[in-house]
Every structure is written in C-alpha cells, then in structure tokens.
Image (cartoon, rainbow, N blue to C red):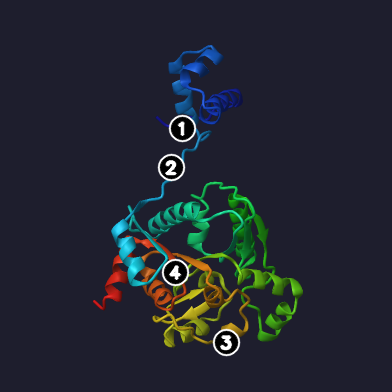
Amino acid sequence: MSPRVAREEDFERLAKVAELYYLEDLNQRKIAELLGVSPQKVYRMLKRAREIGIVEIRIRRSGEVDAELSQSLAEHFDLRNAVVVRTYSGTPEGVVKAVAQAAASFLRDSLVPYTSVGVAYGRTLHSVLEYLPRLDLHGIRVVQMMGGYGGRRWKTVAIELVKEFASRLGGEPVYLFAPAFAKSPETRDAFLSEKEVQEVLRMAEEVDVALVGIGGMRRETSLLIETGNFEEQEIEELVRRGAVGAICGTFFNIDGEVIACDLDKKRIAADVKRIRVRGSRVIGIAGGMEKKEAILGALRGKWLTDLVTDAQVGRWLLSAAKGK
C-alpha cells in the first residue's frame, strides 16, 4: 500500500504516539489507555508513522569483525590494533559504510576522557559520524589537522566535520582557518606566519589520537584530488614518481616513503610522521580494493598504529606481506 500524505491534525497525533513509544518508552497498551483507543489502533498508528516518514529507523551496528584476520594483520604489520570487517556489499558505498560502522564502534571503545583528538577530512571519516553515538567524554579536544580544500562547500564540510566530532565526543573544537594548499609557497608562508595558524598546527601535531583517512591517486579514491585545486600534470607527475596514496596531503609510495614534490611547499597541514615520532596513536580508516596499494604503503611506512579496513583488503594486505 502506498503511503498517503497525512493531514496536519493526523500528523500531530501520529507524531505524539511515536514520541510516547520511541522517546518516552511507553508500551502500546499504556499509550492506548492514555489516548482512549485500542492497542491495535496504536500499532496501526506507529506503522503509519513509519510509512510517511515521521519515524525513521536506523540500525547502528559495528559490522561483523573477522577476529582472526584482524589479529593476523596486526601481527604482520606491528599494529596496536587492526579491525577488519566483513562487508555485505561489494560496492564502494557499501564498503565505506561497513568500515565507517566498524570504526565508530572501535572509537567508542577506544577514546577516553581528557584526550586530544586530531581529525583529517575524508569521505570515510565523514561517514563515521553516521554511526558514532554521543559519548560526552570530559576534557576532549578535537583539532582540525589540515586546512580546507576545494570549493566553499567542501571547506565548510571540513569545518563541520570537526564541529560534529567534537559535539559527539562532548568536547571542544579547534579549527584551522587556512587552505590545505595555498596558491603559492609565498602565500603559504604568509599563512604560517600567523600566530593562530602556528598554534593550531602545533596542537594538531601534539594530539593523543589522530584519525586519518588514506587517499588513493584517482579522483574516485581521494576527496583531496577530487576537490583540491590541483593541476592535472601535478597528479600525473606524482603517479610517475611512484605515488600510491596520501595522508593529510603528504604523498607516499608503495613502501610508505614520502615523495617530495612542489605541493609540499604549499601544504598547510599537520605532519603525521611527527605525530608518530611522539608516540601518539594514528588510526587509519579506509577500505576498498581501489585503495589497497595506498593502505599497504601507509602500513609499510609505519604511518599508522591502528587500522580499520574491510576483509577483502585485509586478505590482500596479508598476501602482500607474505610476498605472495
């Protein structure tokens, strides 16, 4: 039966029943008594509320983690933790959702009060927010690790990501008001001369936990490349020199070695390698076979202490580690 549009008075009545049931936690019999109707009527009203969109039900689950594969991956790459999730859909969107769900569950169990958390923007990181419950941890500070990039919309999204993570964790957001890549080295130097920018970057490199995405070298595998103001020849040159991925705007090869390039002279972002040297946690959140070389490079280069990925990538990484 196709749903019909509810009249305003019906809409309010259905919303009230839904509120009593889902928010006030009253059972259908109690609601029936309060409204002077039958329990069967309440059941039909709740069903109707779902049909016309008054109630939207979202199932939050962490995905099915492959414990054996997770342990093997952690041991082979000397990781503090590996979370490898089985996916129910092989589409890029399905993989992102499964990895994001697993990452949200992992963060819920890993983050503690009075922690500073760095956030670098990416598609999967943004998806994590769909599944991360409100934790309200005391003393949390969430720091933007990389300047905004792309058009006005994407720069706004980068700031909103930090704001929403801080809201979910119950902490204070710290924004980096600068572009990820300046128009020229001289413009970058001008931004870096600002005391506020210097302070935020210092805070970003001193976080206790950094949450990073791992971008590939194609537009469909990297939000940075898709929305960044790069010249096509800049990306082609990086690929010719062996670049397979990037973290926080720094490009690296299959062995995790940094590839020096002109973009470095324009980049405004935290140096993830410095964060690792300090002994802080760097949690990489990425999946999909289109990113497998980028994730392998990040692991070989010791960019990460923890990894959340999908099972197909996990098996491929183990195979690569064993030289098969």
Q: Is residue 49 above or below residue 111?
A: above
Whole-number angstrom distance, CA of label 4 to CA of label 3: 22 Å
Q: Is residue 175 something that shows in the picture?
A: yes
Determine contact: label 4, label 2, CB under 8 Å.
no
Seen from the viewer's position, the closer of residues 221 and 122 is 122
Residue type at mark 2 is Ile
Residue 97 coordinates in the image, percent (x, y)? 42, 54
**Of label 2 and label 3, which has the lower sequence position?**
2
Q: Which residue is mark 3?
A: 262
Whole-number angstrom distance, CA of label 4 to CA of label 2: 27 Å
Q: Nearer the viewer, mark 4 or mark 2?
A: 2
Q: Secondary structure at mark 3?
A: helix
Residue 62 coordinates in the image, percent (x, y)? 41, 50
Residue type at mark 4 is Thr
Q: Which residue is mark 2?
A: 59
Residue 191 coordinates in the image, percent (x, y)? 72, 77
